[in-house]
Image (cartoon, coloured by chain):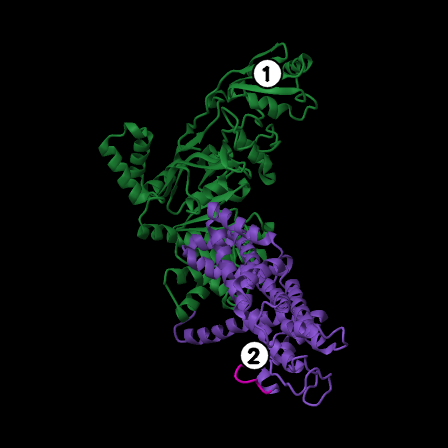
Amino acid sequence: MTMESEHPQDDAAAASDKLILSLHGLKKHFPIKEGALQRVVGQVRAVDGVSFDIRSGETVGLVGESGCGKTTLGRCVSGLTDPSDGAVYFNITEGDRDRVDALRDIPDEQRSEQEREELAALDEAHCINQLNEQARRHYRRNCQVVFQDAFASLNPRHLVNDIVGRPLQVYGEASGSELTTRTVQLLEQVGLGSQHLYRYPHQFSGGQRQRISIARALALNPELIILDEPTSALDVSVQAQILNLLHELQRERNLAYLFITHDLSVVRHMADRIVVMYLGKVVEAGRTQDIFERPQHPYTKALLAASPDLSDDTDTEIPTLEGTVPDPAHPPQGCRFHTRCPVATPACGWDVDDVVRGLENQENLFDGLSAVNRVSPFEAQLTFDNEASARALADTLHSNAISASMREALEEAVVRDRTINIRFNPAEEVELTERAPGHIAACVLDPAAR
Amino acid sequence: MVDSPNTDQIYLQTRDSAWRVRAQRGWELTRTMLANPTTVIGLTIVVLLILMALSAPWITEPNTPDAYQMPRDWSAVRVPPGSPGHILGTTNRGGDVLYGVIWGARTSLKLSLMVVSLTVVIGVVIGSVAGFTGGRVDEVLMRIVDVFLSIPELIFALAIAAVLGPSFTNIILALVVVFWVKYARIMRSQIIRIKQSEYIDAARVIGDSKLRIYLRDILPNSFTPVMVQATLDMGNIVLVGATLSFIGLSEAGIAEWGVLVSEGQAGISAGRWWAPTFPGLMVFLWALAFNLVGDGLRDVFDPRTESAR
């Protein structure tokens, strides 16, 4: 992108210094409970430290495969679940946001009394989980959600009249004839009309139901709407209609959207910026054009390659994604994407779990396994029933059955009696680094080298 | 757009159609139910039995001072059906079988309505608490329900009624203790299911209160299985109640089918079949009719097809 084309956007961003939403290190971990006593045996890290901002009137596309935590993130933002850690700030200026970032980066015990008070004041004023009752209501009104399954999100026993008018009723905004009038107005804004007032949701088509959902979300004049895969359950032709409707509404009302989707092509023409998530982490974020033209992370490239109508725009050398997202209860070390990454390097964080992940399809290999002694995520002793099994695993680890970069990262695979000692080169979690102004990505590969 | 002058007009017109749409939906459900011939048979019998119960004071001369006590005609003891003044005969203590059959329907209606309404309220409250709070409260409540369910209905009711002593009120109490558990279970599972639906999330996002979400979304959507069970229980309760009365746990001499059967059973060997047969037949009809209607309701409200209705 040239400097000329970059400036107008920067000016627009500077003009609206107010951030509708700012996520700071948002985490949502679900405990895994086991046994009669419901002991917590692990954590599913659905969202694991996500930070980004949404400016007023802006569309941010949140993209990732199913299971990467994007819906959970949406639920945290809309207040349907409380985050385990981190915070969501609402209606905050960029200056205050920077202050929050700075204060939160200081470890709890090192904050001075004054800093603590300052953070508490900012939290109370803007953090959605600490707002007082009145401010919480204000936030509730200003952040609405359109769900993926329009049918499931409409009460089957309520008439459209009740559904769309309900937000107005809840806040005592209208009743009687005024309620009906405003409900009709809302329906007309989404392309329906008064003739639809007294019908049940099942009497509508999928696209119409999604329109009803949108009308309900608009009722309270929100500043932000979270769109959780609003079109993925619809036919392609209907998808386009709904996207156009959303686009128009945004122009008319200066709405900000958090557009959650697994399909990059859907947000290409909607989103101003795109955030790509993988296994609860942001792997890349930047302006839509930058993401599409110069994707930095192999995961983003793979997603682009997976979008059929976009494939000619990108390098075709990147194969589409294979396999499934690893278990978020045991995310891979280093870069979480390295297990499926087509360009993984030895420095990407290969670990002991990858041995099992990569070889579990090989028959009989782990049959004789009798004990595992885990020293660290990168080192473990596997004890087998007999020496032959241990040797077989060692041979496999040196063969082509595992990727070259993993073999290179493998420092030791020594067999002593029936035990094999496996040790990998330890790697840190990959930090997000700036690749271009406003464009960040988390990948060990050096952008200068490409 | 809509101008203010015709706003009221639209309001009136649309309020009317909202009512019409709901009525139409009710009518469609009724029609689906009536398309099933066994349901129609069951419903007909139910209506006739209830009519009989309601019009008892006009069909027969109510006994004084207590109409629920069998009148005793000591001048006509053990007369067979067809005798003058005693169309269905009398018992060995001069009780008119026809009077017992008609007022027994009234007793049964009273019994089943009281027990069903009490058990539904108790069950729905306990089930809702368990389903909503979850965790330890839910665990404790559901284990209690399990204990109740592990004892056979009849034996449990019998034991309670026996402990409390023979009286009609105690039969109601015993039946309430036995029958509430099913509703608690049904309600809990419904709430847990519906709590996870997206339209509950949607209502929460709007900012509606928990109580209103419960009343507007959860209760109406969870009530059909409770209703089906209540209809089935209208029959079952009379069946169990009559059994308890038969054993002698009800007040003696009351116009109740079970009491009547027990009064007449001694005469069976002597060929006096009428005293136990007619009330027995009534119990059978009552239980059958409500079960047929309950099954019909279940078919209509089958969860697999319900969403389309």
Q: For the point 70% across and 24% down, which residue is it?
A: A363
Rendering coords of residue A290 (x, y %): 47, 34
**What crowding class fits label 1: few (fewer than 14 Cα within 10 Å), some (14-19), or many (20 or more)?**
some
Residue A8 can be seen in this image: yes
Label 1 belongs to which residue?
A407
Q: As shown in the figure, which amino acid type bears the numbered disc 1?
A: Arg
**Residue B309 left/right relative to A428:** right
Which residue extends farthest bottom?
Answer: B84
**What crowding class fits label 2: few (fewer than 14 Cα within 10 Å), some (14-19), or many (20 or more)?**
some
Magenta region, residue range:
B61-67
Chain ID of residue with mark 2: B
Residue A436: which quarter of the image?
top left
Chain ID of residue with mark 1: A
Rendering coords of residue B295 (x, y %): 66, 64
| Chain green in the figure, letter | A
Q: Which mark is residue B68?
A: 2
Which residue extends farthest top?
Answer: A416
Q: For the point 47% across and 64% down, which residue is it?
A: A162
Callout 1 and callout 2 share a chain: no
Rendering coords of residue B52 (x, y %): 62, 80
Q: Chain B colour? A: purple
State the count of labels. 2
Residue B237: which quarter of the image?
bottom right
